[in-house]
Image (cartoon, grey):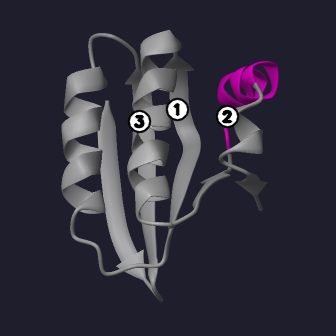
């Protein structure tokens, strides 16, 4: 599990790679929150192209980050979801709150 980040043109980009599950959730949550608290951006794009696996705990991590950004009126978008992540987002209607972008 790895979380990479960068801020470019008022956008925080987060790339999650590996497995987002109960074993990696604490690390992912902590790492993402550190970046989200920096606060010098207007939107968040989460790249899931390198995400190999995500379970319900991983979904909870993403929803938690969504709620934090909603409190600040900042949108979160999902880009390049892996086939597995795309299936989960469609099944759970997560794209309704974190839209998929190209």
Q: 45 or 2: nearer the eye?
A: 45
Badge 1 crowding class, 10 Å Cα cut-off, few under 14, some 14 to 19, many 20 or more, is many
Place of residue 24 in the rendered image (x, y in percent of width and height, measured from the top left) = 28, 20
Under circle 1, the secondary element is: strand
The answer to whether residue 55 is visible is: no
Circles 1 and 2: CB atoms closer than 8 Å:
yes
Q: Of the residues under marks 1 and 3, which one precedes in the sequence?
A: 1
Residue 58, placed above or below residue 77? above
Q: Which residue is denoted by mark 3 in the rendering? A: 64
Work out how far the residue at label 1 is from the one at label 3, CA to CA, in angstroms: 18 Å
Q: Main secondary structure of the magenta part?
A: helix
Relative image position of residue 51 (x, y in whole percent)? 52, 32
Q: Where does residue 88 sit, x and y in percent of width and height?
A: 70, 21
Q: Is residue 89 magenta?
A: yes
The residue under label 2 is 82
| In-front residue for pair 21/57 | 57
Q: Which mark is residue 51?
A: 1
């Amino acid at each position: 599990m790895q979380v990479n980040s960068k801020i470019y043109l008022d956008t925080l980009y987060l790339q999650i790679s590996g497995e987002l599950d109960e074993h990696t959730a604490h690390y992912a949550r902590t790492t993402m929150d550190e970046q989200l608290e920096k606060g010098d951006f207007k939107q968040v794009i989460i790249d899931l192209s390198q995400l190999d696996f995500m379970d319900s705990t991983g979904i909870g991590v993403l929803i938690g980050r969504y709620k934090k950004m909603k409190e600040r009126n900042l949108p979160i978008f999902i880009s390049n979801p892996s086939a597995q992540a795309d299936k989960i987002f469609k099944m759970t209607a997560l794209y309704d709150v974190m839209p998929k972008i190209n």
